[in-house]
Image (cartoon, grey):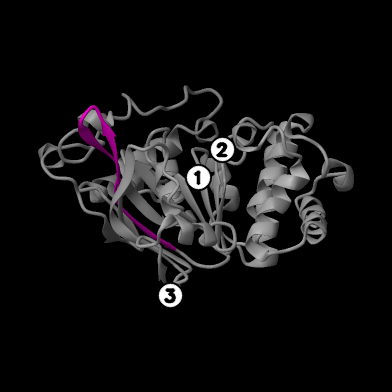
């Protein structure tokens, strides 16, 4: 990491107000990201991945969600004190997000070209002609065939893969330094998934774009990411370089995610799974939130949430990491 990372998140916390009670959706999340780096944010649905990233943009869903603590520094500017008018100048030129479902985030009554050009006119004070020219260039950049014709197409006239590429073009329209990609390959067939991932890697290589990639697919992480942060029940429970986390996990939840991937099991054996269900935010377990599902849990795990501690070059929030490491060494062939 450089002395001043492009993005530095420290102790970020978010709550949802439900039925008179505050539910902690994100709890003390910290991570950093350099230019040209891709961070994979992984975990089961409901673990807090999307809420964390929407908080970076201050685009939390609904009136009942709010940031209750922490700092977010982008290019060493603290975003937390900024008002909405100031954040609008940040979104687009400095950071942008590809939302999970393009069908619900593309305006159905505006052409793709208009939707791309809109941000360029607003942020760069470009003329309509200049913005349209730039929109055409972006559609070509993201690999949309016959881009000049598709510029005047409406979202319903595009395939799922083309809509996802259009979303990427909109996100890139003002040349941001940071891109947040929320499950960018969800509901796409494997061929289109591979094309989208190659596109993100090419954009990173050509422009120095930093990417936070939200996903539950560790195969996608293995193909694209430099570092991995694993979330469970609103906390980061393990974080480190991709090779270290995927080959030497030091948190039982990370181990469970890896073992539950289809490629982890021989064809003749039953696929492994993590027993139980993620906890409800309204009824989080005491101590480590993962302990009801953890085969390594002991009495101490039920008393206090373990801190995210530095271990063997990466971070883990597990009191039993040494047992986990020893079990792996025994299992490895000598």
Mark 3–mark 2 distance (CA, rounded to whole Å): 30 Å
Quarter of the picture containing the N terminus is bottom left
Secondary element type, mark 3: loop
Question: Mark number for residue 64?
Answer: none
Mark 3 burial class by Cα count in 10 Å: few <14, some 14-19, many 20+: some
* Discs 2, 1 touching: Cβ within 8 Å: yes
Which residue is at the front of the view, 293 or 161?
Answer: 161
Which residue is at the front of the view, 318 or 304?
Answer: 304
| Residue found at x 81% / y 45% | 144
Q: Position of residue 75 (x, y in %)?
A: 47, 71
Secondary element type, mark 2: loop
| Residue found at x 83% / y 41% | 152
Relative horizontal placement of residue 61, taking residue 16 as reference (left or right): right
Question: Mark number for residue 100?
Answer: 2
Is residue 189 positioned above or below 36 on the image? above
Question: Mark number for residue 214?
Answer: 1
Mark 2 burial class by Cα count in 10 Å: few <14, some 14-19, many 20+: some
Magenta region, residue range: 14-32
| Residue found at x 50% / y 34% | 261
Q: Position of residue 234 (x, y in %)?
A: 32, 42
| Residue 173 visible in the displayed image | no
Of badges 2 and 1, the one in the foreground is 2
Residue named by callout 3: 4
Q: Looking at the magenta stretch, what is its main secondary structure?
A: strand
| Residue 131, quarter of the rendered image | bottom right
Secondary element type, mark 1: strand
| Residue 276 visible in the displayed image | yes
Is residue 8 positioned above or below 323 on the image? below
- Counting residues from the start of the chain, the first of labels 2 and 1 encountered is 2
Mark 3–mark 1 distance (CA, rounded to whole Å): 23 Å
Q: Where is residue 228 in the image (x, y as percent from the top left)?
A: 45, 52
């Amino acid at each position: 990491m450089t002395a001043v990372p492009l993005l530095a998140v420290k102790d970020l916390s978010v709550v949802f107000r439900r039925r008179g009670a505050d539910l902690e959706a994100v709890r003390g999340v910290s991570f950093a990201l350099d230019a040209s780096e891709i961070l994979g944010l992984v975990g089961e649905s409901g673990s807090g991945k999307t809420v964390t990233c929407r908080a970076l943009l201050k685009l939390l869903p609904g009136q009942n969600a709010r940031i209750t603590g922490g700092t977010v520094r982008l290019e060493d500017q603290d975003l937390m004190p900024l008002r909405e008018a100031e954040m609008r100048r940040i979104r687009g030129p400095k950071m942008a997000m590809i939302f999970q479902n393009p069908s619900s985030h593309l305006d159905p009554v505006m052409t793709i070209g208009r939707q791309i050009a809109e941000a360029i006119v607003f942020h760069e004070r470009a003329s309509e002609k200049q913005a349209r020219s730039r929109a055409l260039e972006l559609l070509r950049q993201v690999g949309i065939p016959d881009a000049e014709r598709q510029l005047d197409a409406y979202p319903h006239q595009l395939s799922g893969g083309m809509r996802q590429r259009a979303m990427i073009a909109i996100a890139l329209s003002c040349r941001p330094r940071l891109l947040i990609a929320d499950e960018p390959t969800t509901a796409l067939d494997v061929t289109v998934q591979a094309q989208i991932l190659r596109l993100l890697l090419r954009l990173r290589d050509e422009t120095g774009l930093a990417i936070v990639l939200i996903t539950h697919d560790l195969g996608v992480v293995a193909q694209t990411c430099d570092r991995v942060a694993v979330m469970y029940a609103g906390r980061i429970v393990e974080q480190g370089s991709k090779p270290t986390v995927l080959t030497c996990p030091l948190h039982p939840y990370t181990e469970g995610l890896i073992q539950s991937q289809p490629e982890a099991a021989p064809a003749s054996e039953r696929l492994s799974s993590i027993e139980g269900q993620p906890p409800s935010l309204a009824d989080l377990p005491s101590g480590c939130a993962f302990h009801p599902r953890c085969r390594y849990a002991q009495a101490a795990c039920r008393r206090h949430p373990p801190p995210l501690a530095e271990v063997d070059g990466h971070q883990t929030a597990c009191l039993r990491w040494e047992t986990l490491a020893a079990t792996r060494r025994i299992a490895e062939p000598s």
